[in-house]
Amino acid sequence: MKCPACRDLNNRVIDSRLGKEGDVIRRRRECEKCGRRFTTYERVEEYLPAVIKKDGRREPFDRMKIVAGLKKACEKLPVSLEAIEQAVDRIERMLLDRGEREVPSSVIGEAVMQELYNLDTVAYVRFASVYRSFQDINQFMDELEELLRERRRQQRERQQGGKGATARPAKPAQGGTRRARART
Ligand SMILES: [Zn+2]
């Protein structure tokens, strides 16, 4: 780091302090040549990647867009806004962890699907049927079948387990599959 007075590169740190939020370190430095004191700041560099759309165009990552999509999918379902915000936090964290400058929209679509699946299965099916252009249709059907298989398995366990057997009468799985197919 060059001295702002004499441009010399040699200086020593005389004080180092962590910012109140813990996200920045402030260092007081002293130039070894002219004695001038100056301050530098160090912080983590984190940028969300740009999103590569299907047609190849790039657009900035838009948190509000994902929150809005999840809210829409969870409309009138027992899912809190807080749970949605946390889901989007996890998606952002995953994108930051990739450490890439650009990411295909399908990666975000898959992450959204995964979060929705955990939030509410009805919301998951609703979202998947509306936004399935995120992925190819075969993958969508695979996911839907997987979901229905899982639901049937849970139903069986509930029936066998006795306790909670009457918890809630799930919709017949087959009907769901047929409806989804009919729409494609
Ligand atoms: Zn200097």
Image (tube, grey):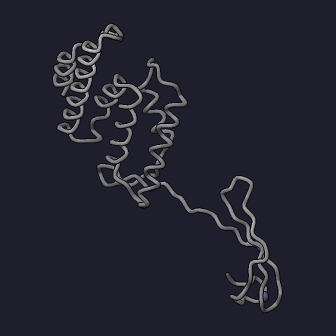
Image position of 4 with respect to 74: above or below: below
Residue 48, percent across and down? 48, 54
Left or right: residue 96 versus residue 122 is right
Left or right: residue 51 versus residue 143 is right
Which residue is painted at 34% across and 25% down in the image? 121
Residue that lies at the very extreme toward the bottom in this rendered image: 33
**Which quadrant of the structure image shows residue 112?**
top left
Left or right: residue 10 versus residue 37 is left
Which residue is painted at 75% across and 65% down in the image? 17
Residue 94, percent across and down? 43, 50
Which residue is painted at 51% across and 37% down in the image? 86
Which residue is painted at 40% across and 52% down in the image? 51
- In the rendered view of the protein, which quadrant contains the N terminus? bottom right
State the residue in front, 42 or 179: 42
Image position of 29 with respect to 70: above or below: below
**How many marks can you see?**
0
Q: Tell which quarter ligand 1 is in.
A: bottom right
